[in-house]
Image (spheres, helix red, strand yellow):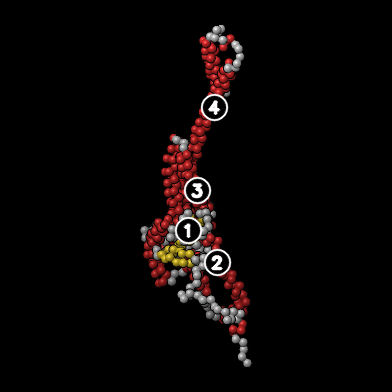
Amino acid sequence: MRGPRPEDFDSNAGQPRPTFPAGGSRKKGKGVRTWLVLWSSGKEQATEAGKHTIMRRTGLPARDLRILDPLLSYPSTVLGRERAIVINLEHIKAIITGQEVLILNWKDPSVAPFIEELQRRIRCHHHATKPQEGAALGEAGTSQLSGEEARKEKKRSLGNQDGSKVLPFEFVALEACLEAAITSLESEAVRLELEAHPALDKLTIKISTLNLERVRQIKSRLVAITGRVQKVRDELEKLLNDDEDMAEMYLTDKLAQKLENSSASSTSDTVVVDLPEGDEDDRFRAEVSSESCHRGSDAHNLLMRAHSALSSTPSGMTNKLNVQELEMLLEAYFVQIDGTLNKLSTLKEYVDDTEDYINIMLDDKQNNLLQMGVMLTTAGLVMSLFIAVAGVFGMNINIELFNDEVAGPGRFIWTVVGGTAGSLFLYFGAIGWYKHSRLLE
């Protein structure tokens, strides 16, 4: 009797199956981006990788990769993680590991000078450490150095032939990133300062719509640049105030520590304790053999815990001492970015002083206009009185002044002249009283 066929259990049997292109490649995911990889040897390669590939390669969580997303706006950030350093400073978006640097926006024209400078520094670092690393590897191959000695040789390899200290690979890349970002901000600040002073001087000479608009644009740029510089300064200050964050950035020491732990664990697994032969030793082995079977796992765990505690103590002390090296590096650029911030603060004070001066000038002009308005109002009042007198004389009233036989035309002329003189006297008297009252105040 024949059993059921696989087609009987397939609900999609008889339906057309989806077809893919002849090349066999599906459509790329939205998370796939092109990264420029710079290795510690100075070589470079452009590679396409997705988010999960980068996470496995660098050991970073998804929230840290989100900081580098060009579609999202994140402030300047420097994060130290277990296996990588995340850099998001101005136009630089990169991930630094112990052996390579991954740059996201490497096609941006503004990033091209930074990539050239970074390649030059990486090559110099590689040439400076290559002879010592080769010698250390040769000695390790011939004499089978232990973990601690290999670590010392690794540290000795981070030095020039003249005995000077060479920074680890991650610090070389970090320094290049900091220098590029801070130099870019400083150049923008200098360029803004060169544009601001002539515009402010023109505004003090002549207050016009064109000069006011130019100063408004300069002030907007000043506020934006000051915020960016302040964020970079705060990020460096936060790192300098936290030794644990700085210790996380020692990726080379972490790799050396892992190599030391792995070599120590492999050595402890192959250690054989030889006891002298004898009846007492044989009896001792026979008595403890059964007990060791039950307690072997617990003893091994205790031994590994003790070994990890002993091995972690020198590492912590080393990181604590070596934090000073990174601290000196960060302090140098902190002083530079703080100087840029002080320069922008001085420019902002100059802008505020200019605004105060302009406001004083406008207030003075407003006061002059008010004084003119008072004088014109007073003149209008006096003229209205004169017009009132003229209106009285213009009425159809029978008086002697209008009788030519009694008064004559000369009397009318003296009346007009007297009214005009009285009006002027009232006007100047009012203005003099107004000024005298202001002096008394």
Q: Reading the chain from its start, which is encountered first: label 4 or label 3?
A: 3
The earlier-in-sequence mark between 2 and 3 is: 3
Residue density around tag 3, few if under 14, some if 14–19, many if 20 or more, within 10 Å? few
Specify the amino acid type for callout 2: Ser
Q: Earlier in the sequence, mark 4 or mark 1?
A: 1
Q: State which quadrant residue 39 falls in.
A: bottom left
Q: Residue at x 56, y 65 (%)?
A: 309
Q: Closer to the camera: disc 2 or disc 1?
A: 1
Observer-side mark, 2 or 3, equals 3
At label 1, which amino acid type do we have?
Lys
Q: Quick one: label 2, few (<14), some, or many (20+) residues within 10 Å?
A: some
Q: Which residue is mark 3?
A: 224
The answer for how far apart the CA atoms under marks 2 and 3 are is 50 Å
- Quickly name the residue at label 2: 308
Q: What's the distance in space between the residues labelled 3 and 1, CA to CA?
A: 20 Å
Of helix, strand and loop, which one carries label 2? helix
Determine which of the numbered discs, if any, sits on residue 373 in the image.
Answer: 4
Which label is found at residue 349?
Answer: none
